[in-house]
Image (tube, grey):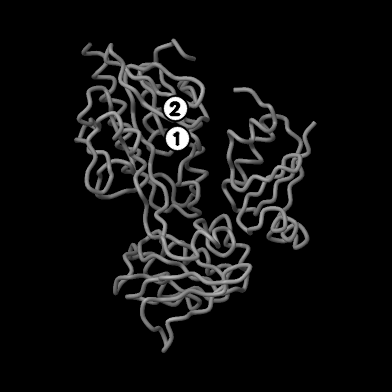
């Protein structure tokens, strides 16, 4: 099973979509609210080199933004 | 999905495309909506207070409601990027994705727009690191910071009002002498003590180290062209996503918009368009939805005259 981390803010629509996608496809993930969790915000910036959300970490591969086709590919989710 | 022929394929999943889908579905046409990002750019708007029937709703809420409504009529929703559209010999169309295609009698083209960029030094370098395009997404990262917004339209005004909830000071920087906000938003801007206007000014460079720490203006503001801020949100309008239509001979105007008539028809038989990608003057959710609805009706008429 893939290890998925989503770095997000509560108001970010793409973050909400990313989390909905994971739930719809029964993918377990850890959600980090970088607007309140400074440690997670720092971790996100270290990983992605920037502060925009969402940042999605799938087994160490870092995606900036919500790219559903790349997410499907990385998680081997069929169409 | 390859050989099955649709009555219409709606390219674009914003509110215009989804509004078209409701009517296409109700008219019992075999319909698919195909889009890379269902919901469209409206989901990045936190406050919609001018869509009839909703005193206030956020963009994602509105898009989801229209999408759920369309699903009531067995409309197929496909989350994929369209790479090409081709006209077939039989007068139909093929709508391609990376690895497949949809065969359809008609197309409703509702691809919308993308953000216009400033195209100044530093914009690309600091993208995501102090240069942002979505206040709703990234504004919260700049609590008690100094935020600039490049843009003078209603969208920029609304962005300023949102970002003033986070920043200690918000500067609205725009090239004309007045902002072009709706009167109701203009009043809110003028009443908000955190927001300051910098008119007749262009950002010509974005500067920083690890992240943004300032911008350079084309003329002095308070005796200096250099101006310190922690983030710049860019909201200077949109570029129509009309290339796929242009490639198959659909007429485009000088702004890059698809030319349509009052029935949402383009110059290409069987190819209709609606919403922000079309050459309408007043681009609103409600007008885009209306064009989508008209397009669906025109598709119905087109198919049934065959």
> What mark, if any, has residue A54 been given in the picture?
none
Query: Which residue does the image show at 64% across and 31% down from the upper left?
Result: A72
Q: Which residue is mark 1?
A: B13
Q: Secondary structure at mark 2?
A: strand
Query: Which residue does the image show at 20% across and 30% down from the upper left?
Result: B267
| Above or below, B168 relative to A16 | below
The location of residue B66, given as percent across then percent down, is: 46, 35
Residue A35 placement, left or right of B99? right
Give the camera-side residue of B292 and B198: B198
Is residue B45 among the parts visible in the rendering? yes
Q: Secondary structure at mark 1?
A: loop
Give how far apart the Cα atoms at labels 1 and 2 are: 6 Å
Q: Quadrant of residue A5?
A: top right
Give the camera-side residue of B78 and A44: A44
| Above or below, B58 relative to B100 | below
Q: Which residue is mark 2?
A: B33
Query: Which residue does the image show at 53% across and 79% down from the upper left?
Result: B228
User: Are dots 1 and 2 in contact, CB under 8 Å?
Assistant: yes
| Above or below, A19 relative to B158 | above
* Chain to which the residue tagged by mark 2 belongs: B
Query: Which residue does the image show at 33% across and 40% down from the upper left?
Result: B275
Label 2 Cα crowd, 10 Å radius (few <14 / some 14-19 / many 20+): many
* Chain to which the residue tagged by mark 1 belongs: B
| Quadrant the C terminus of chain B occupies | top left
Is residue B28 among the parts visible in the rendering? no
| Above or below, B197 relative to B134 | below
Of the image marks 1 and 2, the number of the one nearer the N terminus:
1
């Amino acid at each position: 099973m893939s290890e998925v981390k989503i770095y997000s803010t509560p108001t970010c629509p793409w973050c909400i979509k990313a989390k909905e996608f994971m739930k719809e496809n029964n993918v377990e993930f850890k959600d980090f609210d970088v607007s309140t969790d400074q440690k997670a915000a720092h971790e996100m910036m270290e990983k992605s080199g920037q502060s925009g959300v969402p940042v999605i970490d799938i087994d160490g591969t870092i995606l900036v933004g919500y790219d559903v086709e790349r997410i499907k590919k990385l998680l081997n989710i069929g169409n | 999905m390859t050989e099955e022929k649709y009555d219409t394929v709606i390219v674009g999943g914003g509110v215009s495309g989804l509004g078209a889908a409701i009517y296409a579905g109700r008219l019992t046409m075999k319909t698919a909506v195909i889009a890379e990002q269902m919901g469209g750019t409206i989901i990045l708007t936190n406050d919609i207070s001018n869509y009839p029937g909703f005193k206030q709703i956020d963009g994602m809420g509105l898009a989801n409601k229209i999408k759920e409504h369309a699903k009531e009529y067995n409309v197929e929703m496909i989350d994929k990027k369209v790479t090409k559209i081709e006209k077939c010999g039989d007068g139909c169309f093929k709508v391609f994705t990376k690895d497949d295609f949809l065969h359809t009698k008609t197309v409703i083209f509702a691809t919308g727009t993308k953000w216009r960029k400033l195209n100044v030094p530093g914009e690309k370098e600091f993208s995501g690191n102090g240069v942002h395009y979505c206040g709703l997404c990234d504004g919260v990262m700049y609590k008690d910071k100094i935020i600039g917004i490049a843009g003078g339209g209603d969208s920029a005004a609304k962005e300023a009002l949102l970002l003033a909830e986070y920043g200690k000071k918000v500067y609205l920087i725009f090239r004309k002498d007045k902002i072009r906000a709706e009167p109701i938003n203009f009043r809110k801007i003028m009443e908000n003590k955190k927001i300051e206007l910098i008119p007749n000014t262009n950002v010509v460079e974005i500067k920083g180290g690890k992240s943004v720490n300032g911008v350079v203006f084309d003329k002095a503001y308070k005796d200096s062209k250099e101006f310190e801020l922690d983030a710049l949100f860019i909201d200077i309008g949109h570029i129509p996503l009309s290339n796929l239509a242009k490639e198959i001979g659909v007429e485009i105007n000088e702004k890059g918009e698809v030319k349509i008539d009052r029935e949402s028809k383009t110059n290409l038989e069987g190819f209709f368009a609606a919403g922000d990608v079309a050459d309408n003057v007043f681009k609103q959710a409600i007008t885009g939805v209306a064009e989508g609805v008209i397009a669906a009706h025109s598709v119905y008429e087109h198919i049934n005259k065959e």
